[in-house]
Image: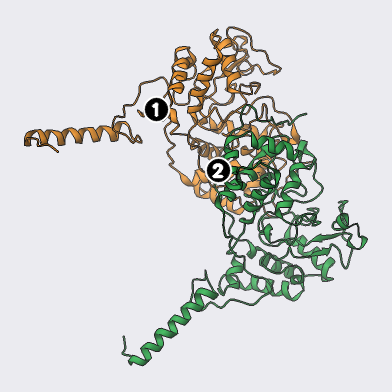
Chain colours: A green, B orange
Amino acid sequence: MYKTPISTRTALIFRNATLCTLMAVGVAGADFASAQPKDEPIKPVVPAKIDNPAKVELGKKLFFDPRLSKSGFISCNSCHNLSMGGTDNLPTSIGDRWQQGPINSPTVLNSGLNFIQFWDGRAKDLQEQAGGPIANPKEMAFTHELAIEVLNSIPQYREEFGKIYGNKKLDIQMVTDAIAEFEKTLKTPNSRFDKWLKGDPKAITADELKGYRLFKDSGCVACHNGEAVGGTSFQKMGVFEPYKTNSPEIGRAGVTKADVERFHFKVPTLRNVELTYPYFHDGAARTLEEAVDIMGRLQLAKKFTTEETALIVAFLKTLTGEQPRLQLPILPPSQNNTPQPNPFE
Amino acid sequence: MYKTPISTRTALIFRNATLCTLMAVGVAGADFASAQPKDEPIKPVVPAKIDNPAKVELGKKLFFDPRLSKSGFISCNSCHNLSMGGTDNLPTSIGDRWQQGPINSPTVLNSGLNFIQFWDGRAKDLQEQAGGPIANPKEMAFTHELAIEVLNSIPQYREEFGKIYGNKKLDIQMVTDAIAEFEKTLKTPNSRFDKWLKGDPKAITADELKGYRLFKDSGCVACHNGEAVGGTSFQKMGVFEPYKTNSPEIGRAGVTKADVERFHFKVPTLRNVELTYPYFHDGAARTLEEAVDIMGRLQLAKKFTTEETALIVAFLKTLTGEQPRLQLPILPPSQNNTPQPNPFE
């Protein structure tokens, strides 16, 4: 269009090169030039990096396999349903023989970001967590020994385990390791809020931004921060007022036997909270409005107005990320010597 | 390599052109030159043709949505699990509050080929079938009215139904129509046996072929024929000897009230029979060997030797086709006004 002296042209080339480098490093994924990543207490979800696809695929099969339960009917996906935000959307779960579970099933999405697992933190990581429900008589009601016997009787499973773990005797650690490896991939990047964090000012509305400012300025971010917007601390449920519940769960104190930790629970992630209703460890809050109101009063001594609650709820719904796109696994069939499910005895 | 006179060369070109046309028309999918489709009583599975992908996608969501049950826990996929051959691999199914179902869940795979639906044929087609379990108090235990209220409260569902059925009031016929449309796509082409039928002599082993010949020559094909290898007639369970069972099911007679149809059941498909254990309407036969032995004695007055049974079983396992490759649907979330699941009352 117009002529530039050679020296200026060279400078432009350098300036553009630098700009491109900055864009690539700083705002990867943003598709506009003016992007400036924001420095906020909430950080964008980093997409999962898959190092061992064969192990992830095996873990997915196990996650969906109801033969890890006594009845042959309940799989990990029954209560952490990946069609429904990684939860069952029930106040408390349904276990073997329709037993009512004691606590709300937390989402498996982004659960690898939790500093510790279960509401009371009794498992140090996803692998330790995965063994729990299989053998819990109120959940899948199986035994680790029988689960191994089932898997070991199925040639395709034996072959897959063999390829990944070498030809060692199949054990429960391999099973929970593969399930955990799959679960670590269940991240939900690119929520509208994350796009805003990465510098797209149009990714959220003015009201949603107001809701975020209110969430931040009211102190919610003290506990709900970081990549998972939670999952990094225990907190007492009911700081300024006691929490009224029919649930007998006492939280962290059940693990540590320390009375000071009574009703201390792991702060849940708020990622995908639009999908993970109902809320709290007892699943007693049906709606986000109810949950925000209770959290404000009990944890922050704040009574949000109806308008403020609506703004915060609007913000919370911007935390819904891209759900994992999974191909439904095809499970290898049982063999004549596979232990039989036992649903009714 | 050697010289051909011009006239012969021209003839060769024509011959090859004709051969190519024949191959394309007659044995599509076969990847060898000598393919000759076989004229047998069993016909290859024709892949599903999808006319209305939006309706299929909606039907898939509904098939996987446990909110069509009273408890919010049981979906179509619970008992017709598409990870497990479209069945639950249990003798009889688990219904609302863990009630034991009366009959074995038949596979949903290739079920569009059935001449009539349910073991006793009480539904004329897949659409009529789909409404049954939702409202059956022993299965999903819901009502059609509540199912509609749930779906109608969810904007994304309203929008999808609106696009497909026009902006009419949502009703149960639309729900079952969409589910049926999805189910019609659940076909399993390209089994090894179908490849053999289409002309690939190496697709099955010599023993598997012996098994097929025995299956055919013994008379099994009288009932188990056609594309689905069954699903086209009612037959009495126990022709030459009475069938011993604890099941109170009387089959077709329950529908027609005609005593002559006592213990008459729809002949099940044998497609994917390797995956759809256990067998028979009462799910009492754990293994294919047991099922073949009983069928031989009761239906054909034949006592197969152990070797013969093994050959027939080997043949039956060649009927496992390509399982539908499905992306797990992401279900639209409930809203504040969505009727709540009610699992424990």
Q: Report the residue at 73% width, 30% height from top.
A: A342
Instruction: Report helix, strand or loop for mark 2.
Output: helix
**Residue nearest the viewer, comparing B116 with B36:** B36
**Residue nearest the viewer, comparing B95 with B181:** B95
Q: Which mark is residue A90?
A: none
**Vertically, is B24 above or below A214?**
above
Locate residue B39 relative to residue A250 in the image: left or right.
left
Q: Which mark is residue B196?
A: 1
Locate residue B211 relative to residue B8 in the image: left or right.
right
Instruction: Report helix, strand or loop for mark 1.
Output: helix
Where on the picture, by quarter, is residue A310? bottom right
Locate residue B73 relative to residue A11 in the image: left or right.
right
- Under mark 1, the amino acid is Trp
Q: Is residue B333 visible?
A: no
Q: Which mark is residue B60?
A: 2
Q: Residues within 10 Å of mark 2 (few under 14, many from 20)?
A: many
The picture places residue A96, in percent across and down from the top left corner, at 76, 38
The picture places residue B232, in percent across and down from the top left corner, at 49, 21
The picture places residue A32, in percent across and down from the top left corner, at 49, 74
Q: Report the residue at 59% width, 60% height from top.
A: A48
Quadrant for the C terminus of chain A in the image: top right
Q: Report the residue at 74% width, 48% height from top.
A: A90
Q: Residues within 10 Å of mark 1 (few under 14, many from 20)?
A: many
The chain letter under disc 1 is B
**Vertically, is A288 above or below A211?**
above
Q: Report the residue at 52% width, 71% height from top.
A: A30
The picture places residue B66, in percent across and down from the top left corner, at 66, 43
The chain letter under disc 2 is B
**Residue nearest the viewer, comparing A71 with A153:** A153
Residue that extends furthest to the right in the rendered view of this protein: A259
